Amino acid sequence: MTKVLVAPSLLAADPLQFGDEIKSVEKAGADWHHVDVMDGHFVPNLTYGIPFVAALKKVSSLPLDVHIMVSNPDAVALDYVKAGADRVTFHVEAAIHAHRLTQAIRAAGAKPGIALNPGTPVEDVLPLIEDVDCIMFMSVNPGFGGQQYIRQTATRIKRVSEALRALGLDQKVLIEVDGGINAKTGAEVVAAGANVLVAGTFIFGASDRSVPIRQLQNLKN
Ligand code: DX5
Ligand code: ZN
């Protein structure tokens, strides 16, 4: 059994109060900050970029889990490492040389992760699972917070979780889930093998953020 880590997604924070919002979830016991970079091409929405990550790094006392939803990850991923990302997760659908990019991110000093959209076959990430620190299942179509969890995600997670176990990598490679996570959907994906939960609305929507964070951290796999 691995402890469940919780990464609040800043996408659901008040953008005019980022400094306070970060402190609030740190005080509430979050494990990582989840930073959703969106480029307006790979996904319709546009958020923040490299200087924002550099600014966050200065005030954050938690690892920065940077999720790059961009159409050119090969070109920009290392800039996020330089800016201070501790973990960089890019999309398998967007990378041209996905394997090379995992190696480059690691060589630059960050932990590489690979994300897959709900409609992407899990087979697409299997060749990479020995070379990443994290496999991120999108449980909504990326681009916006506050969407509904797609229930087929749990079955997809199970397949990768079994593949990791067969390789003896289940203690080494994390399974992260992103989108529509709350106490109920969190329990489903943790039972399927997930051990990192990203949650935006569920955490930032609460007046006491320690309540949802603790609820998710206490889920048992
Ligand atoms: C979606 C983002 C998610 C999103 C999660 O594209 O990658 O991190 O902010 O937000 P909720 O928890 O509200 O679905
Ligand atoms: Zn995300």
Image (cartoon, grey):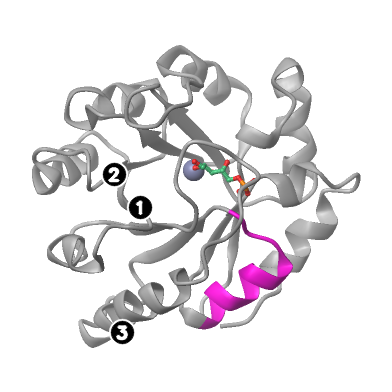
User: Front-most of 179 and 207?
Assistant: 179
**Vertical relation: 13 (above or below) 17:** below
Residue at the spot of label 1: 117
Under mark 1, the amino acid is: Asn
State yes or no: Cβ of the residue under disc 1 lies below 8 Å from any atom of ligand 1: no
1 or 2: tag closer to the N-terminus: 2
**Vertical relation: 105 (above or below) 5:** above
**Magenta stretch secondary structure, dominant:** helix
Question: In the structure shown, which secondary structural element does the residue marked by tag 2 occupy?
Answer: strand
Residue at the spot of label 3: 162
Measured as percent of width and height from the top left, residue 49 is found at 43, 18
Measured as percent of width and height from the top left, residue 125 is found at 21, 61
Please give the name of the residue rendered at 32% of the width and 40% of the height, measured from the top-left corner.
110
- The residue segment tinted magenta is 180-191
User: Front-most of 204 and 132?
Assistant: 204
What distance separates the C-alpha of mark 2 from that of mark 3?
Answer: 21 Å
Residue 182 visible in the displayed image? yes
